[in-house]
């Protein structure tokens, strides 16, 4: 699964990958070698609100390889 295969959705300024947990695990497994030195975020409502209120934290989320949804409210957005 190529990084560009999963679309993203802007949730209050955080670019969240449109995926479920199975897709997230598959994506990470398939790209593990190219992820060396990079990081992945699993973002939930709390981290999205924090990012919305703190521009530097939003940059951390958005500069990750991907920010995957963590929790039903985010995945339903």
Image (spheres, rainbow, N blue to C red):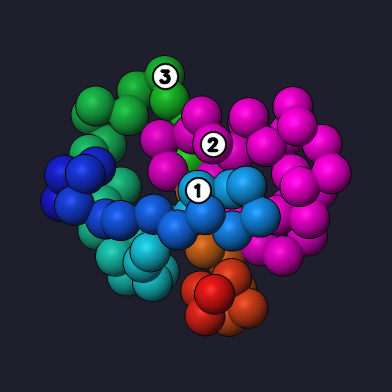
Q: Position of residue 54 (x, y in %)?
A: 82, 36
Q: Gap between marks 1 and 2, in whole Å? A: 6 Å
Local crowd size for mark 3, using a 10 Å CA cut-off: few (<14), some (14–19), many (≥20): few
Query: In this picture, is 12 found above or below 4?
Result: below
User: Is residue 38 covered in magenta?
Assistant: no
Nearer mark to the viewer, of 3 and 1: 1
The crowding category of the residue bearing disc 2, from other C-alpha atoms within 10 Å (few below 14, some 14 to 19, many at least 20), is some
| Vertical placement of residue 35 versus 72, above or below | above
Question: Residue 45 magenta-drawn?
Answer: yes
Q: Which residue is mark 1?
A: 15
Residue ID for mark 3: 37
**Along the line of sight, which residue is nearer the eye, 55 or 61?**
55
- Mark 1: give few (<14), some (14-19) or many (20+) Cα within 10 Å: many
Query: Can you give x and y, in whole percent of width and height, for residue 76 in the image?
Result: 52, 80
Mark toward the start of the polypeptide (3 vs 1): 1
* Labels 1 & 2 near each other (Cβ < 8 A): yes
Label 3 vs label 2, nearer the camera? 2
- Look at the numbered disc 2 and give the secondary structure of its residue: helix
Residue 11 position within the rendered picture, expressed as x and y whole percent measured from the top left = 59, 58
Badge 3 vs badge 1, beta-carbon distance below 8 Å = no
Q: Earlier in the sequence, mark 1 or mark 2?
A: 1
Magenta stretch: dominant SS?
Answer: helix
Q: Is residue 58 left or right of residue 37?
A: right
Q: Quadrant of the C terminus?
A: bottom right
Relative side of 24 to 12, left or right:
left
Q: Earlier in the sequence, mark 3 or mark 2?
A: 3
Residue 69: in sight, yes or no? yes
Residue extent of the magenta highlight: 41-66
**Residue under label 2:** 62
């Amino acid at each position: 699964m190529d990084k560009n295969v999963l679309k993203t959705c802007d949730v209050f300024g955080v670019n969240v990958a449109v995926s479920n947990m199975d897709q997230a695990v598959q994506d990470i497994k398939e790209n593990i070698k190219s992820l060396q030195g990079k990081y992945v975020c699993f973002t939930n409502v709390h981290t999205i609100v924090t990012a919305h209120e703190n521009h530097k934290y939003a940059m951390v989320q958005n500069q990750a390889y991907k920010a995957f949804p963590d929790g039903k409210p985010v995945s339903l957005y």
